[in-house]
Image (tube, rainbow, N blue to C red):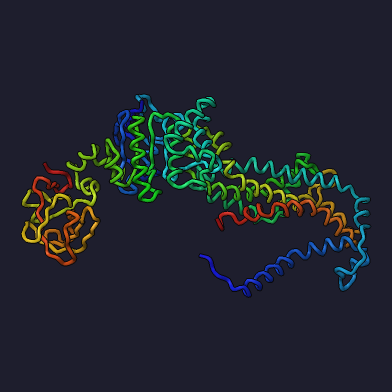
Amino acid sequence: MGRITLDKVSKSFGDVEVIPPLDLTIEDGEFTVFVGPSGCGKSTLLRLIAGLEDITSGQIRIDGADATNVPPAKRGLAMVFQSYALYPHMTVRKNIAFPMKMAGIDQAEQDRRIDAAAKALNLTDYLDRRPGQLSGGQRQRVAIGRAIVREPAAFLFDEPLSNLDAALRVGMRLEISELHERLKTTMIYVTHDQVEAMTMADKIVVLQAGVIEQVGSPLDLYERPCNKFVAGFIGSPKMNFIEGEEAAELGATTIGIRPEHISISTTEGQWKGTVGVAEHLGSDTFLYIHSDVSPSETMTVRVDGEFSARHGDTVYLTPRAERIHKFGADGLRIE
Amino acid sequence: MARSIAPRRKAINTLLAWSVGFLIFFPILWTILTSFKTEAAAIANPPVFIGFDWTLENYQAVMERSNYSRFLWNSIVIAGGSTVLGILIAIPAAWSMAFVPSKRTKDILLWMLSTKMLPAVGVLYPIYLLFIKFGMLDTKIGLMIVLMLINLPIIVWMLYTYFKEIPGEILEAARMDGATLREEVIYILTPMAIPGIASTLLLNVILAWNEAFWTLNLTAAKAAPLTAFIASYSSPEGLFYAKLSAASTMAIAPILILGWFSQKQLVSGLTFGAVK
């Protein structure tokens, strides 16, 4: 079991309130991702749940029981850190065994769980090495192994992939997702990478300045962002925002249109523009276009990989009307 | 980035380094040489460095006149005891300063170090009176406490620097893994800090071994360590350079040997944090 409830939880460091009172429920077995720009309080929120920081006010409940004043060791949660935080003086086997040793689990059971975890994480050949002799990806797997063997109520991941290179990151992302499918344990995952959030989460919590902007499934957030911040944060490349006359015609202060929801033509369309930069990725091409409808920022358009365009070409853009998001003067979504 | 150094330049640098090293070691070498001379040869002017008659008579005289082993034992007990006492206080102190610092932690560290700037003689009178009051004059335990106190700022500071280098996340991971504070210190912090603790111990032993002001002023006969043993040869009877040198050599020999075998540990301890 692992249902975690935050009830009016707030956190201040001295006079600075980093997290104003917030409510949040994480259901048992759910993969929840906290996402937001750096400094938004997502890691702090995770550390409050872990018990590594004391909350200033409010209550944290784990499976209904008040855990607010329970020390981290007794909360039954396992954490994977960005820096892996392995014990450098212990072998991989001892690292993985450490939480079980602390829990007083007998040796035979320890060995059984270590072998199972090592097999699942491809670490069998490395059990007698020290963390210093492993690659980044292997270290991260040891950290995950150390978390698994405890059979915790929930896993907490604090930006676990940001120290890995891009290729490894994709691989580990899949491994963690698969782990979740297999264990069905609650996982809370903190990241600033919206791609990780979109691909892994059952539920995304978007945070900004300690405030929850929106909670929902990845597609919810993509299709119906509740404000301009979420609209701009979720989706890659990010949404184009247009202000002024074009927006006013639709009864909004700002309209937003995603790069993949604009069709392009060399002959006719709603908006005229010139190509600034064309990024050819093979499967897709991203065009950055200077247009009078959005004088302050270039507009991003996503087209087929085959579409050829060069700097200075004149193009015409047509947004798909049903995919236009409208936002009021307060930044909130208008239906 | 590696800088390439011309071989000629390298040769000059090496020569220079050896010269400076020799210059620093020279007084000790001279003392050791003098201890093997006759008293007449020892005061010869200009001094002779190699072409003299080697003799062990000074050592014989010193051994006959003083009970070397008792002074040695006192030195070992006082230096060792003050170090153990100091480290037991310094580890928790450094732990709290490194991992749960307050706004005033830096100030406290500086204030502690500033006590080292006070000339020791400035507090001789009150400490002497305290020692009389508590009956600690000429006792080993009294000296252990005083030497522990005067070196405490340095060992707290050293351990603090070491502990600072240990990432807090590792200790947090231990906490998440179910370790209590005691288990965290025993299983994680101490093993990771062993090189630092070892060089701190070593430095403290050396400092306590060589400390002369308090050991000379607060002891008479019973608790006198090797510093008093040397001092007894710079005597009112006149200057006996050769015997004084023999006594000095015997007093520094143990610590010199200890230093020689642990020099790697010492150097890494003293330059810790500067070069990683």
Residue at 39% x, 43% y: name it. A160
Please give left or right for residue A118 compared with residue A309 in the image.
Answer: right
Q: Is residue A96 left or right of residue A205?
A: right
Identity of the residue drawn at 24% across and 40% down: A218
Asked whether, in this view, residue B196 is left or right of residue B141, the answer is left
Can I make out residue A210 in this image? yes
Quarter-wise, where is residue B264 in the image? bottom right
Give the image quarter of residue A7: top left
Instruction: Locate the N terminus of chain A and report the quarter of the image it occupies.
Output: top left
Q: Horizontal and vertical percent for residue B172?
A: 47, 39
Q: Residue B269 location in percent, x, y?
A: 62, 53
Q: Is residue B204 above or below residue A186?
A: below
Residue A324 relative to residue B103: left or right: left
Between residues B273 and B130, which one lies in front from this camera angle? B273
For image coordinates 65% across by 49% down, the residue present is B199
- In this rendered view, identify the residue nearer to me: B97 or B196: B196
